Image (cartoon, coloured by chain):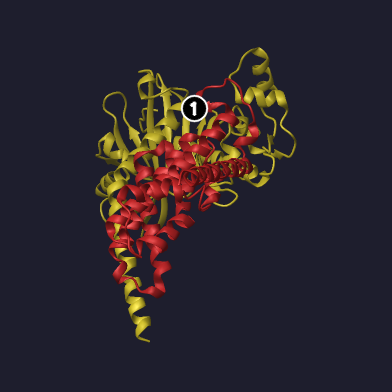
Chain colours: A yellow, B red
Amino acid sequence: MKNIFTIIIRLTLSCLVAAFVMGLFFVLTSKAKKHNEHVNEEKTMYSLLGYKDVASVPQTVKLYAVYRYIVTDLKGKSIAYLVPTGQGASVGFSFITLDLDGKLIDQKPVTVSADDAAEQESRDKAIKVALGSGKEIAYAEDKTIIVTENGARTAYLINGKFPGFKASISVMLALKPDFGIRGMAIVEHEEDPGLGAEIEKKYFKNQFIDKSFAALKTLDVVKEPLPEGYRKSLEGPLDNADDEKILQQYKDHAIYALTGATISSRSVTNGVKGTVAKFAYRINILDNVLKEQNIVVPF
Amino acid sequence: MANDKSSMQLVANGILKENPIFRLALSMCPAVGISTTVMNGFMLGVAVLFVQVCSSLTISTVKNFIHPRIRIPTYTLTIATWVTVIDMVLAAYMPEAYSKMGIFVKLIVAFAIITMRLEMFACKEPVGASFWDGLGMGMGFMIGMMTIGLVRELLGSGTILGYDVLGFKPLLFFILPSAGFFVVGLMMAFFNYIEIFYKRQKGFKS
């Protein structure tokens, strides 16, 4: 009996010490980790758009971030977006609340600097100040980046997260203004190495490039071997005009499933379909409201 | 168990006489799984070295307070703590390397070599000796991993540390995990041969 108590006490104490050590290192490394994630995200973003890094982006190209929020007040829930407003040098931010039918409820200017808006904590704070009391906001983990060149939209960057074979798969998608796919990057996944993990490989993920919005709606997965010529063109680099032609030929073709990883292939395909469809619906509603209310936006 | 070995002897013991991979044949699973290149072997070796040294030091320091009935849980807890620490540090400061071997770092918790060393050595010996023993074992593992990695990388993809040496790929088979066993087996034979050779020479002399 005496043994049990000593054992319990000692084990508990050891666990506490271990937890303390781990917590200490978590605090020490969290800043660097966050920085890494940020750098990684930027790298993926720019590579999807076809630029090497921040410096190689031309002056005429501008990136604007739109954040989606869920607002809860006494009347119920509504959707809201934090959008940059104004034109030229006087770009500010507005918090636009919409009801579930896509009608404007209200629009509040938010005073926040561009750097603070990029950080969730400071952004939430600024929005709360602008809204006043009585309203709860929750970030929907949904950030859209709208890319413009000389004022005209050239691309959207959106994030998608959907269930894979075992755990969630996160992707970043670059869309054309007509919601066709411009590029895809797998940001995070826990698929099996050698099987599902092949979704990261070019010969799988590049199959999505150039799929039009209409083709995406009915996009299917086929369990057929990937044609050799197509695989070569997907893996690039494109040597000659023939490769281009092959890509054109398979442009709206169904996705070829990975051998031994049909479930992963299907979940990526369905996930991308769902992500794009939802995004297109949301951005159309937001655009309509912006137009109806004559809200001037830089994108 | 009285300890009459000097610190350098303890380190050498871990690297040669009781090399974790080639002599004790422990932790074979990671040894064949990850050692496809020299760099991979080196990275995991460093992580194991860190965990081994820290765990040995911790256990050796608190050995008088460990209840004999819960030795093994305490070891596991200690190892898990240090593995989590190195996992977080690598993720924060070496993201490139971490993205390649992240999974395997977490597996260090289950490495037989570390638990075995704590049970055999650190829980009986003073702190200083445990440190040197941990260092020796960790370095032995690291060197073992790097040697296997060197052979496999050279024969499998014709490169060393990513530099193309041969200009062609001799045997793709060596990249596959099963080839790891072949390489480990050959290395063991080599180490045993050296030992026998050494003993014989000594025998002749005396």
Secondary element at tag 1: loop
Q: Exactly how many numbered labels are in the figure?
A: 1
Q: Residue at x 62, y 40 (%)?
A: B179
* Residue A141 seen in this snapshot: no
Q: Nearer the viewer, residue A72 or A144?
A: A144
* Residue B137 seen in this snapshot: yes
The residue identified by callout 1 is B162
How many residues crowd mark 1 within 10 Å: few (<14), some (14–19), many (20+)?
few
Percent from the top left, x then y, of residue B121?
Answer: 38, 60
| Residue A151 placement: quadrant | top left
Percent from the top left, x then y, of residue A66?
Answer: 39, 37
Drawn side of residue A32 relative to residue B173, left or right: left
Check the image and name the residue furthest to the bottom.
A1
| Residue A289 placement: quadrant | top left
Q: Residue at x 53, y 22 (%)?
A: B165
Check the image and name the residue furthest to the top.
A240
Compared to A157, does A55 lie above or below? above
Q: Quadrant of the C terminus of chain A?
A: top left
| Residue A44 placement: quadrant | top left
Kind of residue sitting beneath label 1: Gly
Drawn side of residue A13 relative to residue A53, left or right: left
